[in-house]
Amino acid sequence: MAYSSIVKPSDYFNTKLYTGTGSSNAITGVGFQPDFTWIKSRDSGEANILTDAVRGATKTLSSNNTDAETTVDQDLTAFGSDGFTVGTNNRVNKSSDNMVSWNWKAGGAGSSNTDGSITSTVSVSTTSGFSIVKYTGNGTGGATIGHGLGAVPAQIVVKGTSRAESWEVYNKNLDPSNASYMRWDSTQASAGSSYWNSTSPTSSVFTVNSAGGVNASGIEYVAYCFSEIKGYSKIGAYIGNGVDANGTFVYLGFKPALVIFKNRATAGTDWYMYDNKRGGPVAGVYGNNNKYFLEVNSAGTEGNESFHLLSNGFKCKITNNFQNEANIPFIYMAFAEEPLVANSGTDGVPATAR
């Protein structure tokens, strides 16, 4: 049985749907002031737009390309106590488009962290295991950067912001020697690299080499760091079974609100995103139990496949190599809609079922 220190996961992560208006639009109902907001049009081929409170509102990155950060006064224009405001740009607010936003709470604009050899600015929620880290590279192999989590991160995503760089992904399940990486902006399989200096992250810092993707001298970077919180988040791996009718089941210990995953061995496969707010078509391509998905690495419109969000995990009910290729490893990151149990003390007690 999974226990959680978080009784209400939507206080820390929440998916918010809205309809674009084409004019300045205050989005409310997130349930908290987000520190990291990811926006995508479901209906149009517009970029994924990622904004955080450390870099600042109007500072835009896109997960589906390598572009440097740009200042855009008509994307996400402000964070608010219960949501955010978007401007007139189609990619965040196209008139009549169905839009989705994924929102995480950290710790506001952040503060200085001197745990590593490179001083960083860190916004963190140790309760939910999420931090936003901003730093300037020094070009030195073995440099360390403080992340503020107080726990070992299971996934770290680093992006150079002051010039074009890929989104470099560390995941604890890729390689026990920490010599592999993946990229959010790419369909490539995992590849060997010394980005992480073949060094495991600790509860206070992560380590990088001198490569341009993570630590070029004078280049600014942002890192999104995630540690696992039992009953709220899980960062893991599974092996596809290639079966439609009884596809791979992945136990999480909670009902998922968001699952992001990718085939780590087969090139040409996308990063899929499923959430609990976007349903599925009555009769989709693969039947009546389909879910809508979007892709981290693509500006494409919403598609649908047979994928089930369950009370204690998720199930892939399709044979394709994007989510259930037989005998192939996948990595995933998931966040809870509801824990199976919640915690009122050190070890946790059963929660009220919802």
Image (tube, helix red, strand yellow):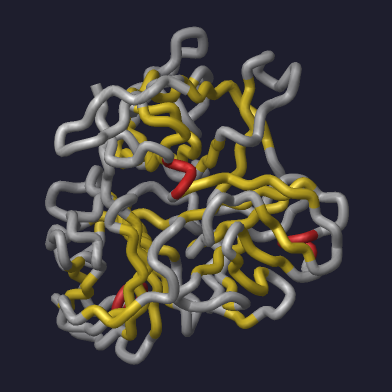
State the count of labels.
0
Q: Residue at x 56, y 50 (%)?
A: 31
Q: Residue at x 38, y 47 (%)?
A: 189
Nearer to the camera, 103 or 71: 103
Q: Quadrant of residue 3?
A: top left
| Image-based side of 182 in relation to 177, left or right | right
Q: Quadrant of residue 197?
A: bottom left
Residue 336 at x, y = what percent? 42, 36
Residue 16 at x, y = what percent? 63, 47
Question: Can residue 262 be spotted in the picture?
Answer: no
Question: Can residue 42 be spotted in the picture?
Answer: yes
Residue 46 at x, y = what percent? 72, 58
Q: Residue at x 28, y 82 (%)?
A: 112
Identify the image quadrant of the N terminus.
Answer: top left
Nearer to the camera, 126 or 301: 126
Q: Where 218 sits versus 212, above or below?
A: below
| Image-based side of 187 in relation to 283, left or right | left
